[in-house]
Structures are given as C-alpha cells and as structure tokens.
Image (cartoon, coloured by chain):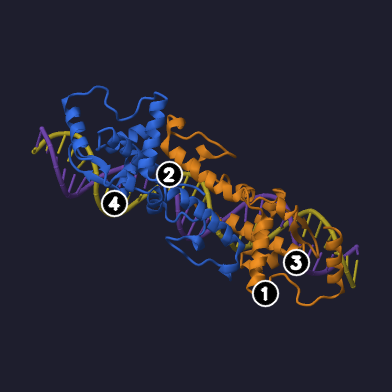
Chain colours: A blue, B orange, C yellow, D purple
Amino acid sequence: MNLSKRSEYALRALIDLGLAAELGRPMLQVTELAAKEKLPVKFLEQILTQLRTGGYVETKRGKLGGYSLAKDASRIKLGAVIRLLDGPLAPIACVSQSDYRRCTCPDEAHCGLRMLMLDVRNAIARVLDRTTLAQIVEITMRKMRRDKVPVPFARQAFGLSDLLVLAQRKSVP
Amino acid sequence: MNLSKRSEYALRALIDLGLAAELGRPMLQVTELAAKEKLPVKFLEQILTQLRTGGYVETKRGKLGGYSLAKDASRIKLGAVIRLLDGPLAPIACVSQSDYRRCTCPDEAHCGLRMLMLDVRNAIARVLDRTTLAQIVEITMRKMRRDKVPVPFARQAFGLSDLLVLAQRKSVP
DNA sequence: GATAAGTCTACTATTTCACTAGAGATGGCA
DNA sequence: TGCCATCTCTAGTGAAATAGTAGACTTATC
C-alpha cells in the first residue's frame, strides 16, 4: 500500500507551489523546491516535467524561469496526481476504476478478495479524489499561523514590487 | 497503493480455508488450495508457512496432512494479515501506527502531505482492521447460494463419515 | 553571447517481487 | 520397519520496479 517517492515528491512540490502562490510568489525554481524539501534536484526535475505533461504545472525556461501551478489549486485533485505518477489507486487491478484488468479468479462476482479490495479502493479514492490541493494548502497555512511557525516562501519585508504583486492579485482574483 | 501477490494469495488461501471450514472440511492441502486458485504450489507453501508463524493457520504434517485455520475466522482481522506479509498499511512510514518512522520533512506537525496520507491510512485501516475473515466468508457464501453457484469444497454426496463430521460440528459450536 | 534556467534521453545500482528447486522432517499405514 | 505423502527450511534466480545520476540540448534574459 505504498506511495512511491515519485508521487511523494510530486505532492510535496505541488503543495509548496500552492503555498508559494498563496503568498504571492507564483513561480519557484527546481533548486528552491529541492532545497526546501531536501530532494535530489535532477530527480525532482523529471517529476516536475511529468507534472507539466499532466497539465498540473507550467514552466518558464531561461533565466528567471521556474515552475508554477498551471491551474487553480482548487481544481487539482490529489488522486489524479497520484494516478498520473503511480498508476491506479486500487490495491489490485480488478477493482481499479481507471485501469481495470481482469484477475485470475474464475468468478469475479463471487470473489471475496475482490469485494474486500473494492471497499479498500473506494476508501482510498474517497479521500484522494475529493481533497484538492487548495484544501491541503489552506489547512497547512492555517496550522502554521496558529502555531506561529514561520511560513515558507513568505517574504520578510515588503517592498514596492511586493505591493504591486499583491495589488495585481487582488484585482484579478 | 499495491497489494503484493504474497498478500493476495494469503488472503485467497485464508478465505478458502474459512469457506471449507464452514462446509465441514476444516483441513485442506496446499495442492488443493493452489489448484482452486491457480497459484504456484511452492510459493503458496511459503506463504502458508508464514501464516502459520503468524498464528493464522495450523498444519498437520505427513500423510493426510494439510492446513486449517488456527483460530476462529471471526477473530482474524484482514488488516493484521496484510501487515504480517506486506508490512504497514500506511502509504508512507511517517503515518504508520504499527511501524512509524520519521520522514524527511522538517516539521511533521505542519506537513500537508502527512495530513493527507494520515487520512488515507485511516481510511484503509478502517476497512481492513474492522472486517474479519468470517465476514468475508459469510458474504461470499451468501452470494454464491443466492446466485446458485456451486460452492467450492462442498461434498457432492453425503456418506456416513460426513454425517459424523456434521454431528460433531453441531455438538461443539 | 554569456549565463541561468528548464528539457530530453540514456544509463545504472539496488532492491523487491514472484517465483523455482531441492534436500529434510514428520506422520500414517502396510 | 519402511514407504510415501505431506509439510518445512534454505537457497537461488530472473525480471521488473525504484530511485536516482549524468550530460548534452534548448530557451530566455541581460
């Protein structure tokens, strides 16, 4: 019932991206993400590229480039992200909704294992297909603020450029 | 989020053993189990040995030997079986109840990924730690009878020895 | 055009998985 | 007692997945 490192890192990166976006820093570089989460840079790059092809992040190349969320965090379902990277959520293929495969048992309709695993699959999917990146980001920020923990990617001081960014964000919600 | 073949075969074998016991055949041989589920015999043997050391099945060696459930099916929790064979149910180690390990994130209390995966772990455990082998066996049998599907391990005809077995089972419930 | 970013493709070490093989122990029965 | 069917223990193995590394290439900014 393992989540791969691939998916784990992908989710961490997305959460960071969401957090940063909330705090007025919509774009982050791989090196920043890798440093924050202590992940191998090149591996994370691969994962981010995969997230791009999946439509979850956008990239800007060249100097001042980086990664940002390609769509609103409230429209990113975590289950879909895991499916993209790890394949089906289902513990066995014969109860997968997204990638069903027949198993070896002679009679699926009367297979006890299948009934059980269908319950498990549904339990997993109920969590992962309902919670959005936005929810995770919001809960994380709330907890950090409540516990007075320094929020990552937040700028210490505000300069003119920050104010301009904030103004823009407000005018285009 | 995969269930290993090991666990899959273990659960199939336990379900068969439970089914057979319900039908008055408390003991089955590896070859029978392997034939019914079309599993490799030697691999299944290893798994059954593991189930024995875990206290789920009992064995009898020699001629007329075989495997039987070591305790009442209603006392066998499927989650515990999977933990024995595959390790923790949790998708990542830092949310495991049975085998917790710290992960790389600097602050677990404010880790969004962890909150999410804790929900997933709990969803999985809620299913697997609550349902017993007896429940699966019962549902399977009910469905088979309802749909008039021949129940496995049921004897075609009754002879004297069968009646004696049934009589014994009734007198010692 | 130098530099700093992401992109693409290939490679690789390690581990896990799903078995296979075979000698050994044990129990029932003739 | 000896035979044979059964479980047991230990070792080995091929394939696949996992978790990266490496490096040449493209693109954008200054």
> A157 or C8, which lies in front?
A157
> Which amino acid, by three-letter code, is at mark 4?
Gly
Residue underneath mark 4:
A55
On the image, which quarter does residue B160 sit in? Answer: bottom right
- How far apart marks 1 and 4 lie (CA) works out to 50 Å
**Could you tell me if the residues under marks 1 and 4 are in contact, i.e. CB atoms within 8 Å?**
no
Eye-nearest disc, 4 or 2: 4
Q: Please tell me the numbered disc located at residue B150.
A: 1
> Residue at the spot x=61%, y=59% of the render?
B9
Pointers 3 and 4 in contact (CB under 8 A)?
no
Q: Is A85 or B163 nearer to us in this picture?
A: B163
The spot of residue B91 in percent (x, y) is: 50, 45
Check disc 1 and give the amino acid type.
Answer: Pro
Question: What percent of the width, then of the height, locates residue A86?
Answer: 42, 52
Residue type for callout 2? Lys
Q: Is residue A153 visible?
A: yes
Q: CA distance from mark 3 to mark 4?
A: 54 Å
Circle 4 marks a residue in which chain? Answer: A
- Could you say whether the residue bearing mark 4 is in a helix, strand or loop? loop
Q: Earlier in the sequence, mark 4 or mark 2?
A: 2
